[in-house]
Amino acid sequence: RFDGTTTQSDGDTIVADDLRIVAQTAITVTNAAAFTATGTYQPIQAAGTVTPTITAGTAGQALVLINTSAQSIVIVDTGNQVLTAAATLNQYDVLCGYSDGTRCIEVSRADN
């Protein structure tokens, strides 16, 4: 049971009555290029339809990707990306996962 308020020193995580994870600055992803999330809640965007790759984070790191652009971003089930199938993220679609230190493993997705 937690009865207090905690704020991380960098101000990105606040725990009180609920948990808030602050969005990072959006990353513009490009075709066939790897990108590294800068935090758990990572907006991504693109100038056209692209198929980037995710660089695996630290073991245990949670990842919430949201496409904020009107362009499709396709994350494929290959290499270090372990998905149920390719994920086509249209505007406001979300892909959630975690890293085991080597791979990005899908937990869920939402087509919005």
Image: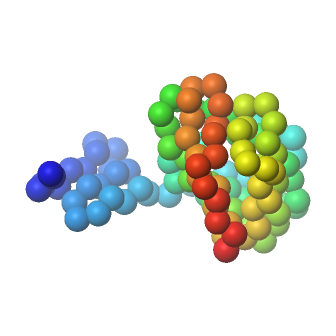
Q: Vertically, is 48 above or below 106? A: below
Question: Going by the picture, which residue comes out furthest to the left?
Answer: 3
Q: What residue appears at the point 64 percent right and 65 percent down from the top-left corner? A: 110
Name the residue nearer the viewer: 43 or 62.
62
| Res. 30 in view | no
Furthest toward the top, the residue is 102
Determine the residue positioned at 22% across, 60% down: 16
Side of 15 relative to 107 (left or right): left
- How many marks the image carries: the answer is 0
Q: Quadrant of residue 112?
A: bottom right
Quadrant position of residue 108: bottom right
Examine the rendered structure and indicate whether residue 109 appears above or below residue 81. below
* Place of residue 80 in the rendered image (x, y in percent of width and height, measured from the top left): 72, 31
Quick check: 22 left or right of 58?
Answer: left
Residue located 51% across and 28% down the image: 59
> Is 5 situated left or right of 25 in this image?
left
Is residue 41 something one can see in this rendering?
yes
- Of 91 and 95, the residue lying toward us: 95
Q: How is the image coloured?
A: rainbow
Residue 70 location, x and y as percent? 78, 71
Specify the farthest residue to the bottom.
112
Q: 16 or 103, which is in the foreground?
A: 103
Q: Position of residue 19 (x, y in %)?
A: 33, 58
Of residue 48 and residue 4, the one placed in the foreground of this image is: 4
Residue 56 occupies quadrant? top right
Left or right: residue 10 compared with residue 105: left
User: What residue is drawn where x is 56% and y is 29%?
Assistant: 100
